[in-house]
Image (cartoon, helix red, strand yellow):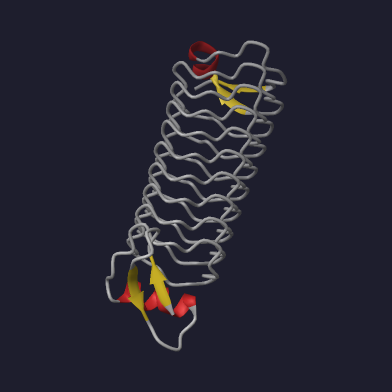
Amino acid sequence: MKIVNLEGKVLFELRDAAMKETVEEAVRQGVELDRVNLARADLMGANLKGAVLYGACLREAFLQGANLEGANLGAADLVQARLTQANLIGANLKVASMVWAWLKDANLSSANLTYTNLCRANLNGANCENAKIERSILCGAYLRNAKLSGASLACSILEGADLNKADLLGANLKLASFHASNLSHATLIGAKVLGTDFESANMYQTQLDSEIEANATLKKAFGRLKTQTA
């Protein structure tokens, strides 16, 4: 099987092997797969730890359960990619396009998702603890039961996102917009909220502290029933 980049140049070849085994062997040998074309590729469960996939096209690729720990996926096209239960610990996803990507129960702890487009992405149950998700777009994203404690979402846009029961304990939410988002039953204790916009957000049974009352915009937010003293 041949692996080619977006210009058609052969980056690696492994005879009598499926695409998954070919890509795994290329990664094992340290081959840099920048701008590789793996659109719709079946890479389910593949071991791609530390892979160099900068600018790669992985649009609609099947990566369920894949190991991408520490991989460089900067500027990659992951639109509608299937990454359910994938390991993306410490991965670089800066400037990646992940619109409608499936990341349910994926592990993104300590990953870099700065300037990443996650519009409508499914991150339900995902582990994003200590992840850097700054200046990113998460409009309409699904983050139900997501673990975001210690994460930084500074200056990100989460308008209309569903964060029901999400854990944002101690997260950095400075200047982020949660306009019309669903934060019901979410935990925001200890979150940094200077200039954060919660206008028209659903905050029914949301756990928050007095800092949010003092520093965030809560105009038209409703259901704030569990304010606690910091």
Percent x, y for residue 216?
52, 15
At x 56%, y 50%, the residue is 126
**From what the image shows, is residue 219 above or below residue 14?**
above
Percent x, y for residue 8?
38, 64
Between residues 122 and 163, which one lies in front from this camera angle?
122
**From what the image shows, is residue 111 above or below residue 190?**
below
At x 38%, y 44%, the residue is 94
Q: Is residue 19 left or right of residue 14?
A: right
Q: Is residue 157 left or right of residue 109?
A: right
Percent x, y for residue 72?
34, 55
Q: Is residue 203 left or right of residue 86?
A: right
Between residues 141 and 10, which one lies in front from this camera angle?
10
At x 65%, y 29%, the residue is 160
Query: In this view, which residue lies farthest toward the front?
Result: 8
Quarter of the image where one finds residue 200: top right
Q: Is residue 3 left or right of residue 224?
A: left
Work out which quarter of the rendered image holds the N terminus and state it.
bottom left
Percent x, y for residue 198?
59, 19
Q: How many marks?
A: 0
At x 57%, y 64%, the residue is 62
Between residues 188 and 200, which one lies in front from this camera angle?
200
**From what the image shows, is residue 192 above or below residue 218?**
below
